[in-house]
């Protein structure tokens, strides 16, 4: 009995001291639409110019935390082709399922870089955004920006293609 107890305690001690397993890599879905020219038209107009960005983000953050998902804040404008291409790609059936499984999405209208600047600055982004869409991936439990330094990588989405956008989003999925 004592030997058995010692073995169990030793196993528990080594298990507790073992490093955490690395996060499994999340693979993006295969996007059947091979180019932006094949996206359904007209492209979506995802940004509500009259919405209360702070309230939208707070509600989305609560939903994300409750669901164990990441918060994806999409800062942009309906005038922006790259923003609309991102929205159109996310609306593809395979992407819609993938995004819904890993993120809670909130779109925030930034006007012509003259609205809702408090959102980016609240996550430590100083000055004017370098481009849009600016995508902020946030841990909803800590409200910490996870993709710091990578927020505007989709600002030239038109040069990427739908699969590249899917791959980029998968890098930040939970």
Image: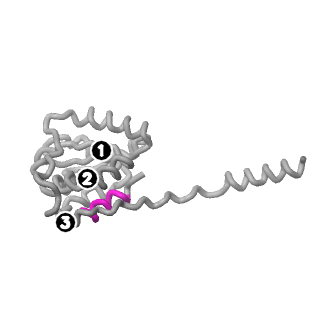
- Position in image of residue 30 (x %, y %): 33, 63
Magenta region, main secondary structure: helix
The part of the chain drawn in magenta is 160-171
- Mark with earlier residue (3, 2): 3
Q: Which mark is residue 35?
A: 3
Residue at x 33%, y 57% (from the top left corner): 169
Q: Which residue is mark 2?
A: 90
Q: Is residue 62 left or right of residue 2?
A: left
Q: Is residue 146 above or below residue 31?
A: above
For the residues bearing labels 3 and 2, Cβ distance under 8 angstroms: no
| Structural crowding at the residue carrying mark 3, measured as other residues with C-alpha within 10 Å and reported as few (<14), some (14–19) or many (≥20) | some
- Position in image of residue 33 (x %, y %): 23, 63
Find out whether residue 136 is within the magenta segment: no
- Mark with earlier residue (1, 3): 3
For the residues bearing labels 1 and 2, Cβ distance under 8 angstroms: yes
Foreground residue among 174 and 88? 88
Q: Is residue 38 above or below residue 9?
A: below
Say which element carries label 3: loop
């Amino acid at each position: 009995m004592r030997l058995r107890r010692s073995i169990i305690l030793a196993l528990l001690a080594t298990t507790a001291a073992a490093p955490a397993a690395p996060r499994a890599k999340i693979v993006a879905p295969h996007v059947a639409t091979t180019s932006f020219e094949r996206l359904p038209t007209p492209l979506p107009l995802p940004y509500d110019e009259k919405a209360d960005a702070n309230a939208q983000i707070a509600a989305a953050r609560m939903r994300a935390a409750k669901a164990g998902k990441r918060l994806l804040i999409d800062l942009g404008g309906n005038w922006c082709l790259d923003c609309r291409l991102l929205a159109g790609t996310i609306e593809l059936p395979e992407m819609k399922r993938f995004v819904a499984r890993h993120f809670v999405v909130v779109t925030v209208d930034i006007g012509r870089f003259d609205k809702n600047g408090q959102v980016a600055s609240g996550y430590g982004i100083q000055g004017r955004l370098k481009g849009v869409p600016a995508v902020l991936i946030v841990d909803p439990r800590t409200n910490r920006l996870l993709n710091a330094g990578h927020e505007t990588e989709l600002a030239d989405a038109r040069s990427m293609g739908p699969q590249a956008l899917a791959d980029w989003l998968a890098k930040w999925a939970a």
